[in-house]
Image (tube, rainbow, N blue to C red):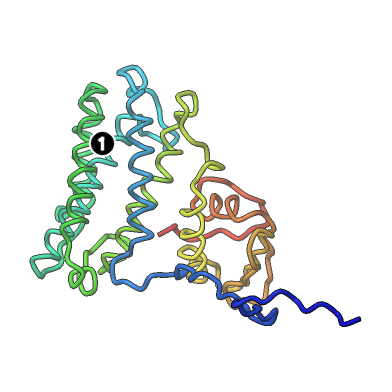
Amino acid sequence: MATPSAPHSDSQPVSSSVVLSEPPQPPEYTPSAVPLDRLLGCARAHARLLELLARVDDAIARRPSLLPGWTVGHLITHLARNADSHADMLDAARDGYVEDQYPGGPEQRNTAIEAGAGRPAQQLVADVADSVRRLERAWDDTHVNTWRGGLGRTSTQGSTSLADLVFLRWREIEVHLVDLGLTDLGGPSWGDLSPAYIEAEWAWSTRRLAERLPSDVTLHLTPGDRPSLTAGKGARIVRVDVPAGAALRWMAGRAEGDPAWPTLATWT
């Protein structure tokens, strides 16, 4: 008996060797002269700051911050004037020249902070909110060509690219959120710094670590949560074996650290 034939079909079998293409993946990094990652990180830190400060009343504004000699009101005023200084440097860069962050130097900075520190909490918070809005508008209004070639000038860094200025502003907010000492209002402690900021700060601070070390030291950082690295060229090797956040706290001068660790020059 003949074997029955298979039913006729117009469709062709699909080869098992055909591999369907994967959907395109977004790029890990979008090339741009605009420091998009830093701007996003700083804007998020601004929002976190303003949310916290909405809970500050007059009594809290008068109490000490974690910075010696400064009240919460001093620190809030500093953050407002710092935002103004960054907006002023951006305005100058758009006009084609380089401006000092504080044209009157440390005296101008300190005088402005002292003058504003004792204001009622409502005025303090409104001031910093206005200064943040002004700075973020200045970022939005800055053309890509200005981001490429513009500079500001700080007392610690000297002439500084606009992208690096955004990082320095981000640092001000993240670290001073902790320095406010408002954990009872839901404010962060050092362990609550944003992961994105820790990543950016680790790259910035470790790149500059060699110049802060005593000349006889090679520092071996072994954080465990990222690759280890060395800084310095001295014959004496000192190992700092703590996670990145704790190491950064020490580098920022916010922790004493192990007595065997070297003394670092000023954090910049």
Which residue is depicted at the point 60% across and 60% down?
A: 262
Q: Quadrant of the C terminus?
A: bottom left
Residue named by callout 1: 77
Q: Position of residue 105 (x, y in %)?
A: 20, 54
Image location (x, y in percent) of residue 141 = 15, 58
Considering every residue shown, the one lying at the far left of the view is 95
Q: Position of residue 46 (x, y in %)?
A: 33, 42
- Neighbourhood count class around disc 1 (C-alpha, 10 Å): few under 14, some 14–19, many 20 upward: many
The front one of 177 and 59 is 177
Residue 181 appears left or right of 38: right
Which residue shows up at 56% across the image and 46% down it? Answer: 255
Q: Relative to residue 242, is residue 204 drawn left or right?
A: left
Amino acid type for the residue under numbered disc 1: Thr
Q: Secondary structure at mark 1?
A: helix
As drawn, is 61 to the left or to the right of 233?
Answer: left
Query: In the image, residue 226 lies at what x, y percent?
Result: 63, 63
Instruction: Return the residue nearer the eye: 199 or 79.
Output: 199
Image quadrant occupied by the N terminus = bottom right
Q: Nearer the viewer, residue 268 or 168?
A: 168
Write the residue at 21% across / 69% down. Answer: 144
Q: Nearer the viewer, residue 114 or 50?
A: 50
